[in-house]
Image (tube, coloured by chain):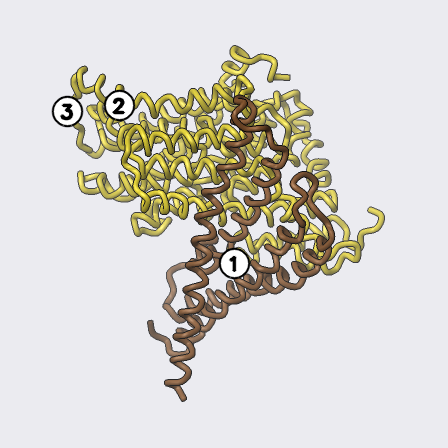
Chain colours: A brown, B yellow
Amino acid sequence: MPLHRARLAAAWRRLTEGYARLLSWVLVLSVGILVVPVSLQIFSRYTDLIPSYIWTEEMARFLFIWTVMVGAMIGVRESTHFEVDVWPKVPPRVEAAVKLVSRIGVLVMALVFISAGIEFTRFAWNRISELAELPLWLIHVAWPVTGATWLIFLGEQMYGDLQTIIEGDA
Amino acid sequence: MTGSVLSPGVAALILFGCFFLFLFWRVPVAFALGLACLPILIIEPRLDTVTLMQETFNAYNSFILLAVPFFLLTANLMNVGGTTDRLMKLSRVMVGHFPGGLAQINVVLSIFFAGISGSSTADAASQSKIFIEAQTKEGYDLSFSVAITAVSAVLAVIIPPSILMIVWGGILTVSIGALFLAGIIPGLLIGLAQMATVHAYAKARGYPTYPRATLHEFFCASWLAIPALMTPGIIIGGKIFGWFTATESACIAVLYAAVLSLLVYREMDLKGLYEALSDTGRLAGVALFCVGTASAFGWLLAYYKIPEAILAGVQSWGMGFSATGFFIAFVFLVVGCFLDAIPAIIICAPILEPLAKAVGMDPVHFAMIGIVSLAFGLVTPPYGLCLMISCAVAGIRIRDAIKDTGIMLIPMLMVLALVIVWPQVSLLLPGLISPEFLR
């Protein structure tokens, strides 16, 4: 039984790791691509090589939104969202307990992002953007996706914290 | 207040009470701001949690904030592409023979870096890796090395281009070109103050110096650095002459840094590019996510007209010009201890603006007081991002570097006082070069 559970946990960890790697690549690509529409905008103004597209500004903004959200997803997995540390140095078990409490805070936000995010996406279901005429839900759906992703990463981290609290080492 | 269940007082208590409570429990700042909004969104019948989604969406849906990842990317490309090395060599021949040579180089490189990148966190991250280990090897104290790296990094948001100026200009509709020009003199003064501090430390503690470079070495280093040194001219000039918008100028900075790395200095490989992009995305993601929740928080404050309530009290004190300036600086310094600079601008700058207007302060002068104060907030605990980054790289705790940081802040605060009481420090250059920007 414990062996079975360990194997399950390992499989789960591999899955989240793969997902995190995928997100990393999405992030790298989106940061790289962000430069394109803004450059187009500048060059089309000063040269005749390319026509001045009207959608560049909007494209840049929408891609930017996704970049921020994907960055925020990875931030939760890597615990890089900045926090204020007013606690003195405490033993690992207490440390794990405090972390668990702070992660419950993030968990609540994740649940809100999922539930309100779904409504937010539904709200944009039949609308299109003003300039590029993209379906708006493609942008709004970033919110519930972010919430769900946090949930996945948090599950793993909170499980780890709990283990530290119970077993007291590591 | 028709239509709201909560009075402004109760709403303010809930917002700030929850925020600090969550901060104490080490909930990340971005999430603490969002969570603090939740009780109100649930209680108030006209609002719901979708409001939070909408407000964060509105915050990110901004062409101006796009400048943030661009400036981070510029800095990262410079580091992987060899630009930083060239500038470092130039700094070495310029100030290496001063007492505390390596620490002086640290400050001067930050000044160069500040003229190209607009992000202090990027500066702190890259220079911590370069300097902290090198300085301790040469016999500098670790806490001194951490502190000087962190405080010199704040120059990046004071010397143009600057992310904070772009955000400030976007939110309060102040000319970003004028802000860019206004930052030059205060930034250089703060840089000088830091060099003087290093000098004093080096004399007191006997820190090493390098032999004086020959004139030939100076010209060689300058020649190699010329392409990099042209960047500020392109970015700031392009903005002032109206060739491109602030965000576009950041994009130009990226393109120029990429050209330098790929074609001129040719030190960037694919792995370096991947890392530059990945670091940029990660840092931009966490820094900007916070902007969304801070905007929601600020939106709720405005919804209950809490800023007006606070201001009514302050305005009855009847402060004069300088007193108002010091008050504004004080508020931003305190807020800067708990918040990152961009969210602090979003929440506080609109609140304080009427105060500055009432005493006839020029919007550009007001902005410089705010930006310089918030820049200092980047090294003041508990939430001083640059100090946190430098400490993390050095592997020490913030409290170990606080004393030296505090000492270094004193001369910097004196420059801030100068900026407050003498508006010309900020307004001279914009007044000379583009008076039409000043109202």
The picture places residue A19, in percent across and down from the top left corner, at 45, 63
- Nearest to viewer (mark 2 / mark 3): 2
Q: Which residue matches tag 3?
A: B211
The picture places residue B324, in percent across and down from the top left corner, at 61, 27
Residue drawn at the location 64% of the way across and 48% of the way down: B57
Mark 3 and mark 1: Cα distance apart in space: 50 Å
- Nearest to viewer (mark 2 / mark 1): 2
Relative placement, left or right, of B154 versus B136 is: right
Q: Can residue B104 be seen in this view?
A: no
The residue lying furthest to the right in this view is B2
Q: Numbered disc 3: what chain?
A: B
The picture places residue B204, in percent across and down from the top left corner, at 23, 31
Q: What residue type is labelled 1?
A: Val
Q: Can residue B392 be seen in this view?
A: yes
Residues tagged 3 and 1 counted as in contact (Cβ below 8 A): no
Quarter of the image with the C terminus of chain A in it: bottom left
Mark 2 and mark 3: Cα distance apart in space: 21 Å
Q: Do labels 2 and 1 share a chain?
A: yes
Q: How crowded is mark 3: few (under 14 residues within 10 Å), some or many (20 or more)?
A: few
The disc placed on residue B27 is 1
The disc placed on residue B108 is none
Q: In which quarter of the image is residue B263?
A: top left
Residue drawn at the location 31% of the way across and 51% of the way down: B396
Q: Which residue matches tag 2?
A: B224
Q: What residue type is labelled 2?
A: Leu
Mark 2 and mark 1: Cα distance apart in space: 47 Å
Q: Which amino acid does label 3 sit on?
A: Pro
Looking at the picture, tell me which residue is in the foreground, B256 or B221.
B256
Q: Which of marks 3 and 1 is nearer the N terminus?
A: 1
